[in-house]
Image (cartoon, grey):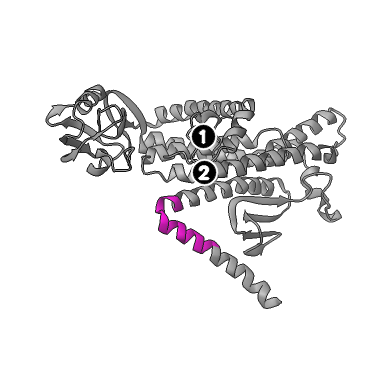
Amino acid sequence: MNDNAQTRPLAGLCGVVGALLLLGWVSKAMLVVTLVIAFVVFAHELGHFIAARITGMKATEFFLGFGPRLFSFRKGETEFGVKPILAGAYVKLIGMTNLDDVEPGDEPRAYRRQSYPKRLLVASAGSLMHFLLATLGLLVLFSFMGEPVARGDRWEVASVMEQNSDGSLTAAARSGIRPGDRIASIDGVPTTQWSELVEIVRDQPGEVIQIEVIRDGSNFFVDTALGEDSEGRGLLGIGGQKSTELVKYGPVPATQKTFSEFVSMVGNSLRGIWSIVTNLGEVADRILSPPNDPNANDNLETRPVSLVGAVQIGASDQLSGSERMQLFVAFNIFIGVFNLLPFLPLDGGHIAIATYERIREGTSGRRHIIDTSRLLPITYAVVAFLAFFGLGAIYLDIANPLGF
């Protein structure tokens, strides 16, 4: 029995490492994005843990992942470890509610016995950590990587269709054109405007053309035979967009841009959450949509995205480094805002309880602790909704991926 107890965690750890190695073999970009998300999840709980240590509260566990314990070690009064499902993390603080059993000697260090400012700090520390990561990400973006800014005077390739309607490769796919390329000319005719390219291609179905491509500042030529659409028009197989250039800022402008962009993205997150809440029927229809449903992704405002989808988007070769940083910032801000919603088991639920208790205490000086058992029905409903929403989003990202 002891041998089994010792080998089971080792086998689980090997399984997790093996899964990560397999993911890295399939796509190094997906592995990197997965590890970044795991870091973000870890940072959230690290915020709670640091705040608990600062305020003198007792944390008995700090684990990355969920499920059976793979390995752990104890340092001081806290057990640190890893569990196999790297979709979350948790810090266990004693006495979070009146329902928790706490040793009499530890009661003074229980969360429920602390002052309102201390409870507020600990409960909000996870979201504050997300906001800190987002702020640092924006500063790096604006100061060093450069903000992608669209230019109205030229265009670039936004997307490349892989196949024609008959299953054959498109002209663009055969010629090796990539998103981000600029097409300078076709058969020597400049294509400064997108409309110029469309006109040239449309009039030459099936013809072999010479394309001048600009990639990373270098020009080269490729020859390819155009396809033909259902109406007999020439088809290259690309989508266009305004070209972008990376704009970097000095310390003061970068700081100002960081503040304004942070506020804007918080507003976008709140609007996104509100859009989902006010369109729950449409969201449910999307979650229940069959595989390869052409309508599943037609409105991204009400299209939930899971961690699976976040990995798919972040690993896409259509994104530049600056765009990935923007995604990292947006992800952190959304998770930070979402966790502040005033419902248990979210952090915002604990903030709401602490605030209500403080209001009830008034100027009496007597500590007021509410009976959280009365909130259990609401909590169970929220958990059920989050489970449906989360599992449904995972299904949606697998059955109808966004196609980045």
Mark 2 belongs to which amino acid? Ala
Q: Give residue 241's quadrant in the image.
A: top left
Residue at the spot 84% in from the left edge and 46% down from the top edge: 99
Q: Where in the figure is residue 61, as x and y percent of width and height?
A: 69, 56
Mark 1 belongs to which amino acid? Ala
Residue at the spot 30% in from the left edge and 25% down from the top edge: 151
Residue under numbered circle 2:
399
**95 and 191: which one is in front?**
191
Q: Is residue 231 magenta?
A: no
Q: Is residue 114 left or right of residue 194?
A: right
Q: Where in the figure is residue 76, as x and y percent of width and height?
A: 69, 61
Discs 1, 2 touching: Cβ within 8 Å: yes
Q: Which residues are magenta?
A: 16-31
Residue at the spot 29% in from the left edge and 43% down from the top edge: 168
- Reply above or below: 203 against 286: above
- Reply above or below: 233 against 326: above
Q: Is residue 133 left or right of residue 250?
A: right
Residue under numbered circle 1:
296
Cα separation, mark 1 vs mark 2, equals: 9 Å
Residue 244 in view of the camera: no
Residue furthest left as drawn: 188
Q: Is residue 183 left or right of residue 70?
A: left
Overall secondary structure of the magenta section = helix
**161 and 74: which one is in front?**
161
Q: Is residue 35 left or right of residue 68?
A: left
**260 and 210: which one is in front?**
210
Q: Give residue 387's quadrant in the image.
A: top right
Q: Where in the figure is residue 143, as x and y percent of width and height?
A: 38, 35
